[in-house]
């Protein structure tokens, strides 16, 4: 029994040893065909387009090709399914999310030599190193559907590697402000006028506003200056007359205030003070004295008038 089990185990090991090389051969093919990618390298900037062309080259007739790749979706954006080449029949054609799967074939006579499998367009959306890798499901089949692709179809094989950089910023062009001046050459003339009517003219040679030119001449517009001086004097007169007007206004205000105060005091006296018991006798005496003086004055005037009448008679 033990010998039977041992023989069975050895037989299984022998079968396994035979299967392993066969599997490896099926994965890599016979080496009669290969995949090629162009361009395999290059430098691009963000916003530019990269067009990847996939071809197969075989020394035996080929009936079908499957090219499966991966790409960095954060750096490259696939612009849709691939455009087909020599293989008119498409079994699968997808490109998104970082994966490409392109399976094509011919319905008639198999083809040989260098043939275009398809063309894929990418847009650069980021900066960095973009590596495109082959997936292990890639293969090239002959008319008997046997995989004849070499190591270029092996999983992890390099398809392309691109260097991507940010787009260069264009230099900013200098702008001219509203107060800037540009020099004039070749006998031109620069004229600058001011608010007072003065003018400055520059003669032949290079000149710019604010610079001194040996050939420049200055002229003053007298009427404009006189008018400006006259206007300035009138303004000074108005300014000088303002203090007098203000002073007069203040004097009138003080006088009015004093008069009003006198009237108020007189009213207070008339209504209150003169009727008080301690003031009334003095007021009465003052009135009597005033009336006595008035009578004496009247008698004196009457006597004088009588004497004058007698003399005239």
Image (cartoon, helix red, strand yellow):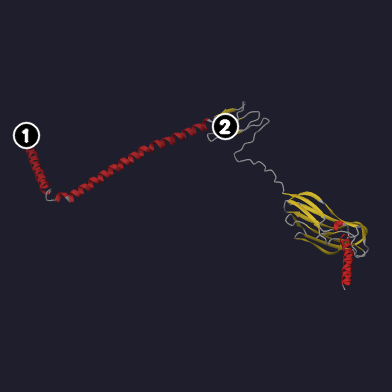
Tag 1 or tag 2, which sits nearer the N-term?
A: 2
Q: Residues within 10 Å of mark 2 (few under 14, many from 20)?
A: some
The answer to whether residue 4 is visible is yes
Which residue does the image show at 41% across and 37% down from the upper left?
Answer: 239
| Residue located beneath label 1 in the image | 311
Q: Position of residue 89 (x, y in %)?
A: 87, 64
The answer to whether residue 88 is visible is no
Which residue does the image show at 49% across and 34% down from the upper left?
Answer: 228
Q: Residue furthest top?
A: 214
User: Could you say which is closer to the camera, residue 120 or residue 294?
Assistant: 120
User: Could you say which is closer to the camera, residue 263 or residue 158?
Assistant: 158
Image-based side of 203 in relation to 127, left or right: left
Q: Position of residue 187 (x, y in %)?
A: 67, 30
Number of the front mark, 2 or 1: 2
| Residue located beneath label 2 in the image | 199
Q: Position of residue 76 (x, y in %)?
A: 75, 55
Q: Residue furthest front?
A: 2
Q: Is residue 191 above or below residue 78?
A: above
Which residue does the image show at 49% across and 31% down from the upper left?
Answer: 226
Image-based side of 252 in relation to 216, left or right: left
Q: How many marks?
A: 2
Q: CA distance from mark 2 to mark 1?
A: 97 Å
Q: Is residue 164 above or below residue 137?
A: above
Q: Is residue 57 above or below residue 10?
A: above
Which residue does the image show at 9% across and 41% down from the upper left?
Answer: 293
Q: Position of residue 184 (x, y in %)?
A: 66, 33
User: Could you say which is closer to the camera, residue 88 or residue 296?
Assistant: 88
Q: Is residue 304 above or below residue 94?
A: above
């Amino acid at each position: 029994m033990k010998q039977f089990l041992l023989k069975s185990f050895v037989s299984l090991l022998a079968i396994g040893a035979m299967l392993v090389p066969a599997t490896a051969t099926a994965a890599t093919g016979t080496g009669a065909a290969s995949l090629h990618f162009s361009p395999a390298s290059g430098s691009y900037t963000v916003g530019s387009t990269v067009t990847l062309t996939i071809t197969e080259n075989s020394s035996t007739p080929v009936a079908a090709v499957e090219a499966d790749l991966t790409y960095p979706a954060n750096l490259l954006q696939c612009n849709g399914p691939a455009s087909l080449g020599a293989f008119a029949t498409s079994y699968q054609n997808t490109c998104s999310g970082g994966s490409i799967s392109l399976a094509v074939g011919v319905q008639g006579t198999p083809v040989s030599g260098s043939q275009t499998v398809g063309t894929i367009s990418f847009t650069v959306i980021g900066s960095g190193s973009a590596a495109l890798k082959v997936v292990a499901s890639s293969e090239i089949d002959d008319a008997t559907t046997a995989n004849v692709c070499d190591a270029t179809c092996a999983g992890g094989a390099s398809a392309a590697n691109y260097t991507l950089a940010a787009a260069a910023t264009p230099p900013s062009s200098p702008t001219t402000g509203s107060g800037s001046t540009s020099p004039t050459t070749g006998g031109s003339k620069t004229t600058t006028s001011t608010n007072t009517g003065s003018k400055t003219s520059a003669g032949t040679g290079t000149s710019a506003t604010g610079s001194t030119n040996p050939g420049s001449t200055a002229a003053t517009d007298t009427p404009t200056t006189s008018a400006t001086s006259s206007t300035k004097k009138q303004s000074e007169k108005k300014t000088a007359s303002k203090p007098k007007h203000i002073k007069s206004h203040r004097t009138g205000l003080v006088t009015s205030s004093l008069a009003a105060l006198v009237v108020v005091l007189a009213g207070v006296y008339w209504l209150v003070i003169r009727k008080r018991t301690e003031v009334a006798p003095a007021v009465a005496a003052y009135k009597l004295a005033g009336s006595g003086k008035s009578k004496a004055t009247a008698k004196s005037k009457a006597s004088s008038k009588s004497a004058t009448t007698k003399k005239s008679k």
